[in-house]
Image (cartoon, grey):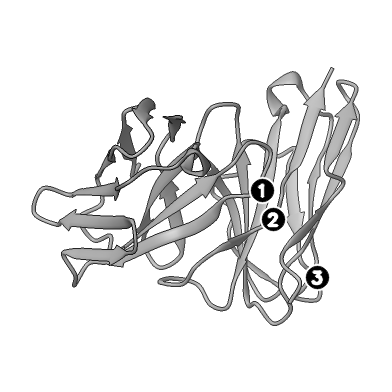
Amino acid sequence: GENVEQHPSTLSVQEGDSAVIKCTYSDSASNYFPWYKQELGKRPQLIIDIRSNVGEKKDQRIAVTLNKTAKHFSLHITETQPEDSAVYFCAALSGTYKYIFGTGTRLKVLA
Amino acid sequence: GAGVSQSPRYKVAKRGQDVALRCDPISGHVSLFWYQQALGQGPEFLTYFQNEAQLDKSGLPSDRFFAERPEGSVSTLKIQRTQQEDSAVYLCASSPLAGVYEQYFGPGTRLTVT
């Protein structure tokens, strides 16, 4: 079946540094890639998304890049803050409705 | 407005018991999804409804799992004869339509089977 691989599984950065999380997807027809942030015991919340007709999208300190040829997309967080600490999930839309999620990255921002 | 709500938030069941998990989607959202999230893993798709029609149940792990959305709004996920491997967080999500739309997640129900 379709799958999404996500790396790294854990990431620790100093406050103010950048964090990068990478995902690779298998379904070449995927055309939508959301990123969710999940704080401990809370619901996943969308932080940014990108469609396949765009190579990069930025929203303040968060950016996502997409390489359709390599079937690879990445989340970039700049100037990290302690409140960025959470688990981040990438996902790829497979078909017309099914999200395939990565296994998550636990980000720790050290003050 | 109100987001997606789920109840109960926590459920402890003895092995072999039946459980029912409820999801109240955002009003007017056509699409509703159920996911299973094991500890330390990403959400895994279980089933998808468009209004009251269950269009995909390919992710349900066994015939002990059953979901319904009879009036196209509230949905219930039922697990019969629970097993320890059913222990997980069950997430519900809704979206205005399926496809390239944000899925809004509920807080989840943490099921522990003892």
Q: Position of residue B41 (x, y in %)?
A: 51, 31
Chain letter of the residue beneath label 3 in the structure image: B
Q: Residue at x 38, y 25 (%)?
A: A12
The amino acid at mark 2 is: Gly
Extreme-left residue of the structure: A69
* Mark closest to the chain's N terminus, 3 or 2: 3
Pointer 3 with pointer 2, Cβ within 8 A: no
Question: Quick one: label 2, few (<14), some, or many (20+) residues within 10 Å?
Answer: many
A26 relative position to A11: left or right: left
Above or below: residue A3 compared with residue B5: above
Helix, strand or loop at label 3? It is loop
Q: Which mark is residue B91?
A: 1
Q: Which mark is residue B106?
A: 2
Q: Position of residue A42 (x, y in %)?
A: 67, 45
Pointer 2 with pointer 1, Cβ within 8 A: yes
* Mark closest to the chain's N terminus, 2 or 1: 1
The amino acid at mark 3 is: Pro
Extreme-bottom residue of the structure: B28
Chain letter of the residue beneath label 2 in the structure image: B
Where is mark 3, residue-wise?
A: B70
